Image (cartoon, helix red, strand yellow):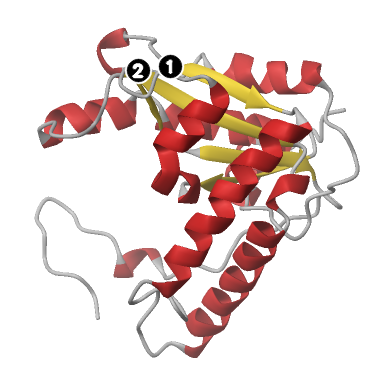
Amino acid sequence: MKLNLSVDEVLATTRAVRKRLDFEKPVEPEIIKECLEAAIQSPTGSNSQSWQWLVVTDPDQRSALADLYKQGWELYTQMEGNVETAYKGADEDRISQQSRVLDSATYLAQNFEKVPVMMIPILPGRFEGLPSMASSAMLGSILPGAWSFMLAARERGLGTAWTTIHLMFEEQAAEVLGIDYQSYTQCALITCGYSKGTDFKPAKRPPLETVLHWDRWDGEAP
């Protein structure tokens, strides 16, 4: 069932869903395929169409990935600058928002194996040592498709979140999933499941004028 949201509504209300994921409700393979049909309509660098999409629903595979994710999360939270918040300013609303994000991210890490669907976007080749133009082209060949998948999921009542923590152990994850690590790069792990309720609202963001630059860089706003 689709929510019949407008394009602008989908764009403004596709949030990272963690605490409101329904761990008990399975996601029909047909729904995931519909979302991926949207994903493969996305543009790619040089029209390469080189993306691959690995959908993980097997409980043992999900559990193995969850073990790696939890190890990575433990390391991440111990890194300098990540203990409390990624935001270091003095805006109380931003601090409060970031605290809620950290709380929900911790919840997801603690329950990672319960996520009904884990979708891994993959590109051929490795990023290591590439010049910035080449690495940007690779990212530009996967990010539009991944975001299209997440938008299509939102329209179908699913919640998603873009995660990268498992990539701290990408080679081990490749072994779990049967991926040739030397030949393919895992770009993320998108968690996916039906959301508890679909009433997501636009997030509070800084005013556009604080981040907008026109024709020439004029410095970052304080």
Instruction: List the residue tagged with mark 2.
Output: 44
| Residue 83 sits above or below residue 118 on the image | below
Residue 13 picture location, percent across and down: 65, 50
In the rendered structure, the answer to whether residue 11 lies left or right of residue 159 reads: left
Taking the image as shown, residue 126 lies to the left or right of residue 165, namely left
Q: Do the residues under discs 1 and 2 have CB atoms within 8 angstroms?
A: yes
Residue 122 quadrant: top left
Quarter of the N terminus within the rendering: top right
First in residue order: circle 1 vs circle 2: 2
Q: Quadrant of the C terminus?
A: bottom left
Q: Quadrant of residue 87?
A: bottom left
> Which amino acid is tagged 1?
Trp
Pick whichever, 1 or 30, lies toward us: 30
Disc 1 secondary structure class: loop
Residue 30: image location, x then y, percent:
79, 16
User: Is residue 66 something one can see in this rendering?
Assistant: yes
Q: Residue at x 55, y 51 (%)?
A: 69
Write down the residue under mark 1: 51
Q: Position of residue 109 (x, y in %)?
A: 63, 58
> In the picture, residue 46 is in which quadrant?
top left
Residue at the spot 52% in from the left edge and 47% down from the top edge: 163
- What amino acid is labelled 2 in the image? Thr
Which percent across, then down, holds residue 196?
86, 52
Q: Looking at the image, which residue is at 36% across and 71% down? A: 79
Q: Residues within 10 Å of mark 1 (few under 14, many from 20)?
A: some
- The residue nearer to you, when weighing 122 against 64, is 64
